[in-house]
Image (spheres, coloured by chain):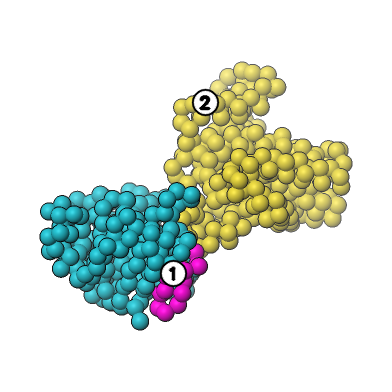
Chain colours: A cyan, B yellow
Amino acid sequence: MSLLTVEGAVAGYGAAEEILKGTAIRVEAGEIVTVIGPNGAGKSTLLKAVAGLLPLKAGRIVFEGEDVTRGDALARARNGLAFVPQERNVFGTLSVDENLVTSAFLWPADARKRADALYDKYPMLAEKRRQLARTLSGGQRQILAMAMGLMTSPRIMLLDEPTAGLSPSAADALFDAIVTLNREGMPILMVEQHAVEALEVSHRGYVVVSGRTEAEGEGRGLAADPEIRRLFLGG
Amino acid sequence: MLSAILQALLNGLMTGALIAIPAIGFSAIFAVLRYPSFAIAGYITIGAFAGWTLNVSFGLSMEVALVGAALVAALAAVATEQTIISRLRPSGALTAAIGSIAMNLVLENIVRFFYGNDLRGYDVPLVPDVRFWGLRVGMQQIETLIISIIVMAGVFLFLTRTRFGRAMRAVADNADLARLKGIDPRKVSFVAVALGGALAGLGGVLLGADTSIDPLTGFRILLTVFAAAVLGGLGSIPGAVVGALSIGIAEELSLLVLPATYRGAVGFVAILVILTFRPRGLLGERAL
């Protein structure tokens, strides 16, 4: 049984043409899975649908053997799916510490303990714990956003273009953080524009084109595939 | 002239402290529910009359009147929101705002039905004004200032030190992200409306103790409260305090050069000026 399965997902915004037209992916326990594809292919829409921010019109989402298709974002958070959006992923008017503690809203009893554990894991956050989140740099903000995701006791992290807008060194540091997190046992499903780098650290990858899953393979294999490189990776 | 200006500043500070309490309530509701609730005028009036009933009809202390008024006004606010406004909000902020104006009229007339149109005064002892450095300030105003400071400190502690307070700020900042963190915006909205109503009710009692009350008490101060919230930045709690103090002081200073009849125009002018030059308000980005 896969940890997360998305089957025949159809979704879109309002009456416009559907963005997802039968997308199918799966994530096994302990994996990093990256979804790549051209702009407008529906990668972020897929993550939003998995996170419960966009209802499916057809298809289903199964997490840990349970059909969670009908739940909204609140229910998915309770189910253990942590979605880290690409933009506006921290509460800018709250301090770093408040961002962490507030993210554990459903688990107030040990929120402090968890936040302190994350300060040990990400010392940069400890240094800036009293700063407003909006004053952080792009890379620092992404680390905070991931840490906020971890505060919700997730059993999978959904990362929407975590390195978007970051400098190459900040992006590398973030990929390192993602790999470390995964080695500690956290399954990760991410969508990335930096496709080569993302696929190289992923166990498996999917290529989504026009809302459909066009290819699937081992991460490094996809990154090295000349056809994939020509079509989507600009190389 | 200098002492007249200092006296106006002092009076403005007192007036501003009084306006700040309902203005914080107005901003708290706006920050979370994203519509301007003009029904706050009705909550102020209901609070003023609930406090008056406890203080005058039942002979209870002002402290009890304040607590009772806050509870009754919070209840009125929650009932108004849950039964009427929540049905209008899906149609947009403008619809909800217009609905809140209608609900203010409803609440005002409920009060009128039970209490009539007469002016009523709280049972507060008459105490001579305090005089210092050629300035004069009433004991009641000093008490109002102290209560306002205590209430503001309480709101600040609630918003920064409690789980629901922080959740309220999180929803005000980014409701979608809050939902992803397991925060139910409906529960937070409930708390925000109850807090807004309670603060409006407290404001009603403070107004009543300062002057007298009638069913139009809330409506009369509505523009000033709205102007304070807009000036400070809609949805910003510190902004509401800064806006209220600014409007209070501006109103009092205007009396030095304008007849008292034009005092109410200060709120209108403040709204026009701030919307023209700084539409997000003085502290619009620092929503607490």
Residue at image coords 68%, 19%: B259
Mark 1 vs mark 2: same chain?
Answer: no
Question: Which residue appears farthest toward the bottom when viewing the image?
Answer: A1
User: Horizontal and vertical percent for residue A230?
Assistant: 15, 54
Q: Secondary structure at mark 1?
A: strand
Give the camera-side residue of A143 and A56. A56
Left or right relative to B265: residue A185: left
Callout 1 amino acid: Arg
User: Horizontal and vertical percent for residue A169?
Assistant: 16, 55
Q: On what subunit does the disc labeled 1 rest?
A: A
Callout 2 amino acid: Val
- Residue A195, can we see it? yes
Q: Secondary structure at mark 2?
A: helix
Spatial CA span between label 1 and label 2: 54 Å
Q: Which residues are magenta?
A: A61-73
Rendered position, B203 above or below A188: above
Residue at image coords 15%, 59%: A227
Rendered position, B38 above or below A192: above
Give the camera-side residue of A13 and B247. A13
Task: Kindly identify which residue carries mark 1.
Answer: A60
In the picture, the quarter occupied by the N terminus of chain B is: top right
- Residue A118, can we see it? no
Q: On what subunit does the disc labeled 2 rest?
A: B
1 vs 2, front mark: 1
Q: Which mark is residue B278?
A: none
User: Horizontal and vertical percent for residue B91?
Assistant: 61, 46
Q: Count neighbours of disc 2 (C-alpha within 10 A) and say few if under 14, some if 14 to 19, many if 20 or more.
A: few
Task: Kindly identify which residue carries mark 2.
Answer: B273
